[in-house]
Image: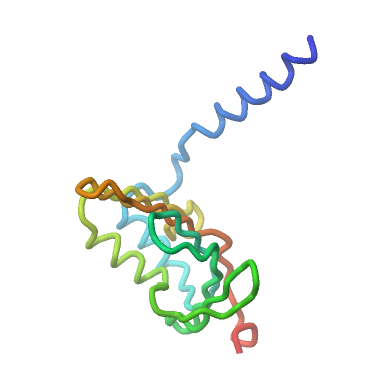
Amino acid sequence: MPNFVRPLVSASLLLAFASCSDSTGPKTVSEAESLWQSKNISNYSYVVDDACFCVLTGPVKVDVFGGQVVRVTLVATGAQLPTAGHYTVDEMFDQIRSARPGLTVVFDRALGYPTRIERCCIENDSGSITTISSLVRLDVVTIQ
């Protein structure tokens, strides 16, 4: 096989697998929320990154303890930020259910939390993409 063909074949296979949907993951908000609640996780952290036409700070780590956001840290510098405007997974589900049309959500197949939230606002041609990743369960000692 010529040298230039191998990367093309690899890229084609990667795209084919990436485009396959996971038939075992939650497809609706109700399914995802039920899966999340069944895990009974109240102490966790996750990384969130917002891409929008707003002030961008970069990815932040959000720590949740006892179902409350207790700390928000800028990933790049470790600087602490105000917790206002950052949400627990349960609050994200509330926002998703009450959102206007034009929202697209992808859920984690193992835990059910939203991993990508796309908001579209047609009237002023703005929108945002929120990516949630690296969710891990925390010990009480980890947060204090």
- Numbered-mark total: 0
- Kindly indicate the quadrant of the structure image that contains residue 7: top right
Query: Is residue 40 left or right of 126 when viewed as pictured?
Result: right
Above or below for 80 versus 57: below
Residue name at image x 56 percent, y 70 percent? 61
Query: Is residue 31 left or right of 110 when viewed as pictured?
Result: left
Above or below for 1 versus 135: above
User: x%, y% of residue 138?
Assistant: 59, 77
Residue name at image x 46 percent, y 73 percent? 40
Q: State the quadrant of the C terminus.
A: bottom right
Question: 11 or 60, which is in the foreground?
Answer: 60
Question: 97 or 71, which is in the foreground?
Answer: 71
Residue name at image x 36 percent, y 50 percent? 118
- Kindly indicate the quadrant of the structure image that contains residue 137: bottom right
User: Residue reaching furthest bottom?
Assistant: 144
Residue name at image x 64 percent, y 25 percent? 11
Question: 92 or 54, which is in the foreground?
Answer: 54
Query: Is residue 124 left or right of 138 when viewed as pictured?
Result: left
Indicate how the structure is coloured in the image: rainbow
Q: State the quadrant of the N terminus.
A: top right
Query: Is residue 22 left or right of 100 when viewed as pictured?
Result: right
User: x%, y% of residue 38?
Assistant: 42, 67
User: x%, y% of residue 17?
Assistant: 56, 31
User: x%, y% of residue 6?
Assistant: 74, 18
User: Residue reaching furthest top?
Assistant: 1
